[in-house]
Image (cartoon, grey):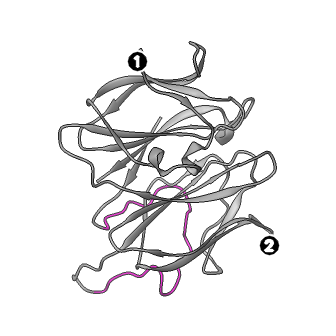
Amino acid sequence: MITVQVRKNGLLIVGALSFLTMLLSGCLKESTSSTYTPKTYISIMHLAPRSPAVQIFINNQPSSSGINPGTVSSSYTAFDPAVLGFTFKKSGGDSVVTSLPSAVYDSLNYYTLLLYNPDSTHVQALRIQDDFSVLNTTQTFYRFFHLCPDVGNVDLYFDNNIIESGRQYADIAATSYYNQFFSKTPSTYSIYVKKAGTDSVIAQASSVSLAAANAYTIYLKGMKGGTGSNALTVDILQAAD
């Protein structure tokens, strides 16, 4: 399934998800003039299947309703550039699940805040800067996140061609290399995630159209025996203008 994540120029379509619905004074403002104000853009990927639903606090102020594990933003949210700190608390309570320290969120940049399970009992948050500067009009671009904690190492295939091999769970936390986008010939592909070094399919997505000048985050999420938003699935998040 492709989720289209709108980006660029501040023209954001608010999706069905209720991320950041309580707007913070001084953080997210509506311009009253026609003058363009530079913004920073933030999205959320809650991909920690062993986590509870979380509520987001920005600079200690509540900024979302409960977000279930397995849920991702369908759009970026525009903020005024600022120093922001994020705390993720158990929905309906005051227990801190994880947090990100205060950091500068620059104008005209895009960030993904991602939650994952570093082990069976903890939740970790990552701040990923989404660099779309590599995009061009002739190639499509992808990156792959392995965020299913109980399937071991995996290989990524486009049709019958192996694209990435031996990807480890949550290796995006250890190196920024896997957070960047890589070029590929635009086409319609069947995408397979297989157990590393074997032909055993863990999850697949058929007839996925990857268009030129677009960026896609392909991610393996959920867990064995998971249901609903925590089902073991490979999904595709398209960052589109």
Above/below status of 93 relative to 206: below
Return the residue at label 2. Answer: 94
Return the residue at label 1. Answer: 159
Above/below status of 141 relative to 46: above
Left or right: residue 93 compared with residue 216: right
The tag earlier along the polypeptide, 1 or 2, is: 2
Amino acid carrying mark 1 in the image: Asp
Q: Which residues are magenta?
A: 10-32
Q: Considering the numbered disc 2 on the image, is that residue within a helix, a strand or a loop?
A: loop
x 25%, y 86%: residue: 33
Rendered location of residue 3, percent (x, y)? 44, 43
x 32%, y 40%: residue: 141
Above/below status of 70 relative to 165: below
Rendered location of residue 100, percent (x, y)? 62, 68
Report which quarter residue 153 is drawn in. top right
Task: Pick the quarter of the image with the C terminus.
Answer: bottom left
Rendered location of residue 71, percent (x, y)? 59, 49
x 32%, y 25%: residue: 188
- Viewer-proximal residue among 169 and 207: 169
Q: Residues within 10 Å of mark 1 (few under 14, many from 20)?
A: some
Left or right: residue 6 compared with residue 192: left
Label 1 and label 2: CA atoms lie apart by 46 Å
